[in-house]
Amino acid sequence: MRAAITLDLTSDVPMHRQLSEAWRQGVLQGRFRSGERVPSTRELAHSLGVSRSTVTAAYEQLIAEGYLVTARGAGTFVCRELPEMLLPQRPTPKRARPAAAPVRWSRWATAVQREHHTARPSHEQAPGMTSFAKWGPDPSHFPAALWRRLILRHWREPKPGLLDYADARGYEPLRQEIAAYVVRLRAARCTPEQVLIVNGSQQALDLSARLLLERGAEVAFEDPGYLGTRRTFDAYGARLRGARIDQEGLVVSDLGSRARLVYVTPSHQFPTGVSMSLTRRLELLAWARRQSAVIVEDDYDSEYRYSGPPLPCLQGLSEDVPVIYCGTFSKVMFPGLRIGYLIVPQPMLQTFVRAKWISDRHTALIEQAALTDFLREGHLERHVRRMRRIYGRRREVLCSALSRHFGERVSVHGECAGMQLLVRFEDRRMRQWAIDASVLLPATDGYYLRPRRHTDYSEFLLGFAAMPEAVIEQAVRRLAAAVPGAARR
Ligand SMILES: Cc1ncc(COP(=O)(O)O)c(C=O)c1O
């Protein structure tokens, strides 16, 4: 804690009073936060150049007034409940505030302000509500003790390079591990030089948008598609051209002839769950070749495939078309890690690396070093194998509970892969019934570029990976009990 206290040596007010008053103001103004440890009397006396008894007297006063507390053997702390909070509020005289000068926002800021966030509905947090709006992994199954050991390994005697600014491309050994991983498991064409470590796919998409989009330019986009990308493209002023998704994936004939960039999730389309057929992949590459367009491939959760090995990525099929491949550790490990990667075509690499450097220098290094070990020692593949079994069972429980209770009235899509299912109920009143049953079903409406005309069904994206089997069973049973005519088995 920085004291940031100045004492007036010429004042008549005794030093210890000046000191206690300065602390009091610091606490009230939030410069010293509740629960924070205060410097020892010796440290503070030394840094202010006053006697230790002056500081002791000031601290004793503050302790008596309830601003500080001492914990035996642990030190002195700013109190969690300040005297002012406990006193009745005195009315403050109304004074006209000077009008703040209007902020002159950038064009980007204006676009960001227009982007309304799809705020989570308030009833999601309601007690007793079971939410299917968690699309991430189950954190309780992550090997936290192992991760802690790997992190500590690098802190024990940190290599000097790990504590300094470093190469914007990321930690070299990690880039090697990732290149080997995507070549072996995703059939990508990739050398370690092409790997750029970023803070999750979101930064990969942000850098791609910044470098490849002009304001007003047309971008081809899956419809329905991932909101995280759409919001980014919108903020950079792109005009999105929607392409439909059918059983084979993106409908290439919808892409038109103006776009120079297309964003796709071919392994596991978000949110429909469709895997793009080989024919469509080849069609898409042919389209990009004709258009001189760049493809951004978001391969966010292909490791979770329940009927056979993961499909080879699109990037691996392209010899002459620039494909920017975005991978992430958010789903296979945990989203809070904020580590993802780009595989960038060689001719575009330098520009991406410079953009990353300008944007935030590089991604945190100790985590990158621990992640290198996690990959190198086989922990990632073991963890994914284990989680695939757990998520696979949860997915089966959800599918069979839905079919047992709702029969023909429900259809499930994208059940071969991922951590969520697209579920369609043949009744548009479903969402309300679900709320009545204290179950949150997140609707897919927001993912569609064009509002759908069909309103005789309701469609939801149900995350199941973070939900224990019994909770899934119970939620579907509750749902069935609230829906007229559903089977109660
Ligand atoms: C389509 C898609 N791409 C990427 C991500 C992961 O983003 P990040 O790596 O920034 O956590 C998600 C997460 O939900 C996603 O749904």
Image: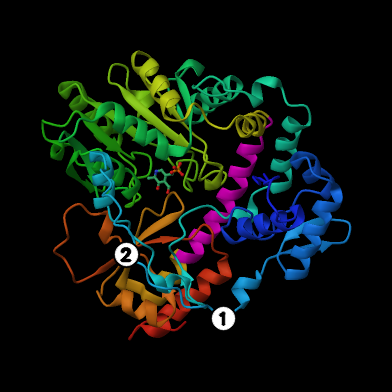
Label 2, residues with CA under 10 Å away: few <14, some 14-19, many ≥20: some
As helix, strand or loop, the secondary structure at mark 1 comes to loop
Look at the picture and state if 394 lies above or below 48.
below
The extreme left residue here reads: 257
Label 1, residues with CA under 10 Å away: few <14, some 14-19, many ≥20: few
Disc number lying in front (2 or 1): 1
Residue 161 location (% of width, % of height):
65, 20
The reply to whether dot 2 and dot 1 touch (C-beta < 8 Å) is no
Residue displayed at 26% across by 49% down: 102
> Magenta span covers which residues?
377-398
Residue displayed at 48% across by 42% down: 308
Look at the picture and state if 140 lies above or below 96.
above
* Residue pointed to by mark 1: 88
Is 382 a magenta residue? yes
Residue 215 vs residue 25: left or right? left
Mark 2 vs 1, N-terminal side: 1
Of the pair 388 and 228, the residue shown nearer to us: 228
Residue 261 location (% of width, % of height):
23, 31
Q: Can residue 228 be seen in this view?
A: yes
The yes-or-no answer for disc 1 within 8 Å of ligand 1 is: no
Residue displayed at 54% across by 55% down: 391
At label 1, which amino acid type do we have? Answer: Pro
Of the pair 434 and 107, the residue shown nearer to us: 107
Residue 238 location (% of width, % of height):
20, 38
As helix, strand or loop, the secondary structure at mark 2 comes to loop
Q: Distance between the residues labelled 2 and 1?
A: 46 Å
Residue 187 location (% of width, % of height):
45, 26
Exactly how many numbered labels are in the figure? 2
Residue 300 vs residue 25: left or right? left
* Residue pointed to by mark 2: 443
Residue displayed at 49% across by 53% down: 136
At label 2, which amino acid type do we have? Answer: Ala
